[in-house]
Image (cartoon, rainbow, N blue to C red):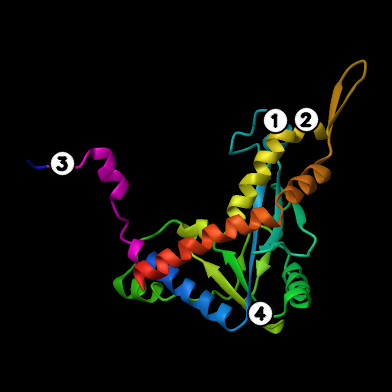
Amino acid sequence: MPHFTSPLLRNIISRNPFDSIRRKQCLQYLKSLRSLQYDGFKTIYFGETDIAESLITGEEDLSDGYFMHAPTWCIVHASSSQGWVPWKYRMFLRDELCIKREESLFFEFCDVVKKAYGKCAIVVKERRQQDKMKPKEDTELEAQVRVPSVINLMSIVCCPEVAKSCGHELLSLPSPYNYLNPLDSAWSSLKWFIINNRKEFCLQYIDNVYSYQYILLSDLISKGIGRINSSKWKILTNKVRRWENYYLGKFS
């Protein structure tokens, strides 16, 4: 008796024309990472996340997306398999009046991890971009993984030459494979901590006309980051390692 795939399942398993290219990029990234690890490089995951004002206050986001934008804080930090790196995380206010990227901060970071770990393979997640139709010869070149001249995060400029000057190598993780970066899970845990504990870091003041709410944001973020300890990092990085082994075994 013939079996027909349901329309829902058919949508799930449909492939984008660029999937094979991305898969090759991911495989090349993993091979480069393993080669560096075998050569004694320590893996460091460097990245950022956005914390919206509504997440901190618990109030509805009233921005309309066109003319009114609610402020957003961007947190930059890094981790290894043992936990957060011994570098003071940075927090930037991102709004329409603040769009400058820090260029010197990446050198400071590279210098700190050099003193702490020696030579490192610094993994940065590339920003997601929409795939566009390209000529065939361009897609052939795209299948080859390359490290761009710079990797622009929202707040930091990451330059391979700066990493090399400190003895490190900078690797770009293809965007569809974000789960190969344990920082994504750590950021999720931080945001859940903010949601569940923001009231404990909130002070209120009421006068004859207005009521004011003060949120101890720095304390809230620091406490949330501190809750992700070394044992949790070990679980996150072991999960990533299993995915890496799966891809290397399946597609190599």
Residue at image x 69%, y 78%? 162
**How many C-alpha atoms fall within 10 Å of the one at disc 3: few (<14), some, or many (≥20)?**
few
Q: Quadrant of residue 206?
A: top right
Q: Quadrant of residue 182?
A: bottom right
- Residue under pointer 2: 199
Residue at image x 58%, y 84%? 39
Helix, strand or loop at label 4? It is loop
Identity of the amino acid at label 3?
A: Phe
Q: Nearer the viewer, residue 51 or 94?
A: 51
Observer-side mark, 2 or 1, equals 2
**Side of 74 relative to 237 (left or right):** right
Asked if the residue at tag 4 contacts the one at tag 1, i.e. Cβ–Cβ closer than 8 Å, the answer is no
Quarter of the figure with the N terminus? top left
What are the residue bounds of the magenta stretch?
3-20
**Side of 242 relative to 4 (left or right):** right
Picture coordinates of residue 84, whole percent (x, y): 72, 60
**How many C-alpha atoms fall within 10 Å of the one at disc 2: few (<14), some, or many (≥20)?**
some
Identity of the amino acid at label 1?
A: Gly
71 to 44, vertically: above or below: above
Helix, strand or loop at label 1? It is loop
209 to 96, vertically: above or below: above
Quarter of the figure with the C terminus? bottom left
How far apart are the two marked residues, 2 and 1, measured between alpha carbons? 9 Å
- Residue under pointer 3: 4
Identity of the amino acid at label 4?
A: His
Residue 17 is covered by the magenta coloring: yes
How far apart are the two marked residues, 3 and 4, measured between alpha carbons? 52 Å
- Residue under pointer 1: 58
First in sequence: mark 1 vs mark 3: 3
Observer-side mark, 1 or 3, equals 3
Asked if the residue at tag 3 contacts the one at tag 2, i.e. Cβ–Cβ closer than 8 Å, the answer is no
First in sequence: mark 2 vs mark 1: 1
